Each structure stands twice: as structure tokens, then as C-alpha cells.
Image: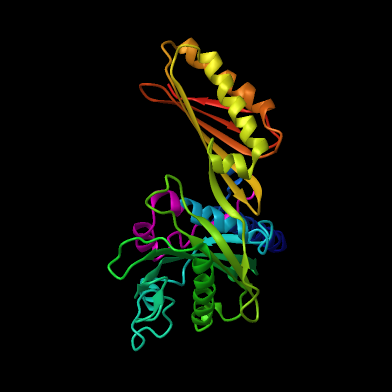
Amino acid sequence: MRKWMLRCLCFFLMFSLVACQRAKDVIDDQDDRNEVISTSASGENYYPILSSPAKNPSRETFYTSVSNFDFKSIGRGLQLYCLDYFSKDDYYLQEGQYLNNDRLREVLRRNPELYPYSIQPERGSVIEGYEDAIMVTSVFEQNFLQRDNGEYTIKGAAFSIVIDPQDAFGKEVEMQDETVYAFGKEAAQKLYTYLKTLDQLQDVPILIMVYQSSTEKQIYGGHYIAKVYCQDSFGDYQSVDDRYVIFTSSEAENYDPTTYTEFVQFKQHLKDFSQYEALGAVGYVHYRNGSLESMVIHVRCNVKTYTELVTFLNVIASDLNDRFSKTFDIRVKVESQDDFEAVVIKRSHEKARIELFY
């Protein structure tokens, strides 16, 4: 009897240990899912995101220093360039954690005694006739981590230096592209030197990008102009061909005549279909490394019935499937005389689909 009870007790303890281990495995899996946000719904070329800690400590300072369009093109553009150095299959993206507001002040303010690592021009210096010009408005950070033995550790970092030339009184001024490019190299070298004073970034590779902010005259955002990838030392500072082009502008016709012609045909097709109703279509096209990356089209039309609207949207979708010879992502935002009506999305290598709001 005693042996039988002992056997039962041993069996019960073994079962409990196995159950506890399985429960722990489930909890670990749940914790991992809670920490990592999948971005597969966003499309290709997006990193899985670590949600903890979720916020960039200098997010408010960054947001208030750039335009509404720039904050998106800075962040998305930086991620796209990072793909060349940090594979999305091997790294997790995390909001920048190391350039907090105090450290931002160290690189953005210029007082050689208080801020020896400032990346701004020195006081008394003259750039294109502007004395004491203010060149850098912000620095944006993203971190790249890998998981090792259940812990996430930083294995790479990327930074955007946002350049928006202003005079000593804060008024925006225009400068030659060559001047901005040359200053960007000086600023990147200074920033790299400062970053290597931070313990957490001592032994990780760093990508530094230089972003030229949009001006008050532009109705679209700025663009990246240079990059430097640094491993054991400051790397090779290179220009990048990154730009936004409005269709149908003379710049678009000169830069990409094939897509320009196809867009004109697309626009004319919509006008022919709408006949007597007013219609407008403007395209905002992003080129990266000289290649067409994406196109956003704003279409405004007058529709009087639901059937008209659905028919018009399907005409757009059908045209997108066959119109453009190059492969890229297209999003069409459709507004009527009354409201925002729908979006037509065509991913590269996929058929267009319609999302109608009603």
C-alpha cells in the first residue's frame, strides 16, 4: 500500500513539473508576442517592432521641430536605408532610446563651454553670407536589436540629421545644395564622435543619414541627401539620390519621362470617364536610389450617386493594374465634393483593391 502511494505521489510530482514547464513556455511565448509587434500587415520591407519601451524619450521635441510630412518621410526613409545594413529578418526595430532631451541639447545648442559636442556651426562662422546660421533642427534615432538567450540587446543604431538652414534670428533661408551637403558631412562626423562617448553605443555599427528639410515654398516633404555607415570608425560619406516629385510637373517630365507620360494618360482616362464633372489628380512620387519607390495620388471628383462612385473607383483600380510599366506601390486617395470617400491600394505585384468608406 505504501509503495503504491509513493508511486502515485512521484507520478503526480512529475506531471506537475511537466505542466509547470509547459505553462512557463506558454507564458514566455505570450511575453514574446506582447513585446514584439508584427508589421506584416503594413507590407514588405517593415521591421518587427519591439513595443517595450514603446516611446522615444525625445519624441515631443522631434515632432515639434519638423513638419507634418517630414516626420513621416524622415522615419520611413531611415528604415528603408537601414535595410541595406540591418536585415529585417535578423533585427527588431525599437524607438530610439539614447538621444533623450538632455543629450539632444548637447548636440543642438552651441556654447563651446557647455556643449563641446554641438553639431551646429560655431558662433561667428559665416555660411553663404549668413553669420551665426542655424543649420540643424533635430536629430532622429532608431535602434536595432537582436534576441540572445531570451534578452534583446542593441546591435545597431541609425540617426537622421535634419538640416533646415535658418539665419541667426530663426528665419528660413535657402542655401546651395553643395553647401548643405558639405555641412552635413561635418555634422555627421561630430555626431559620430559624440555617440561614441555613450557606453551603450560603443561597440555597435551606426548609420548616419543627412536629411534636407522641406522649405516653406514646397508642398511636399524634404529628402535624404547623404549617408555614412560607421563600424570601427567614421565611414565613407556618400550622396544618395532621394527625392519627391510632383506629377505632372516639368521636373517629373524631365526626371522620369516614361512614368510622366503614363500618369498623363491615367489622368486623361479619368477625365474622359467623368465627362462633364470636374476632376483633379495630383501625384506625389518618391524616388530612392534613383528608383521609383512609391506613388500617392490625390483624386478629387464630383459624384452624385453611390453607383457613380463605385463605378469611378473601379475604373481607377482597373487602370492602375495595367497603366504603369514600372513596379511600385500606389495609393490613391479619392475625395468627392463632400467628403473623403475611399482609398485604392495597389501593392507591387498585386492587383488593386478598393477600400470604400460609408
Above or below, 226 against 198 in this view is above
User: Which percent across, then down, holds residue 309?
Assistant: 48, 16
Residue 41 appears in the rendering: no
User: Which percent across, then down, holds residue 252?
Assistant: 58, 41
The quarter of the picture where the C terminus appears is: top left
Front residue of this view, candidates 9 and 121: 121
User: Which percent across, then down, holds residue 41?
Assistant: 58, 41
The colour scheme is: rainbow
Farthest-out residue, left: 169
Residue 216 appears in the rendering: yes
Front residue of this view, candidates 326 and 32: 326
Above or below, 254 against 139 in this view is above
Residue numbers of the magenta segment: 43-71
- Taking the spot 63% from the left edge, 81% from the top edge, the residue there is 233
Front residue of this view, candidates 252 and 81: 252
Above or below, 282 against 35 in this view is above
The quarter of the picture where the N terminus appears is: bottom right
Residue 355 placement, left or right of 111: right
Q: Does the segment drawn in magenta span residue 52?
A: yes
- Taking the spot 64% from the left edge, 42% from the top edge, the residue there is 256
How many numbered markers are drawn?
0
Farthest-out residue, bottom: 113
User: Which percent across, then down, holds residue 345?
Assistant: 58, 32
Q: Does the segment drawn in magenta span residue 308?
A: no
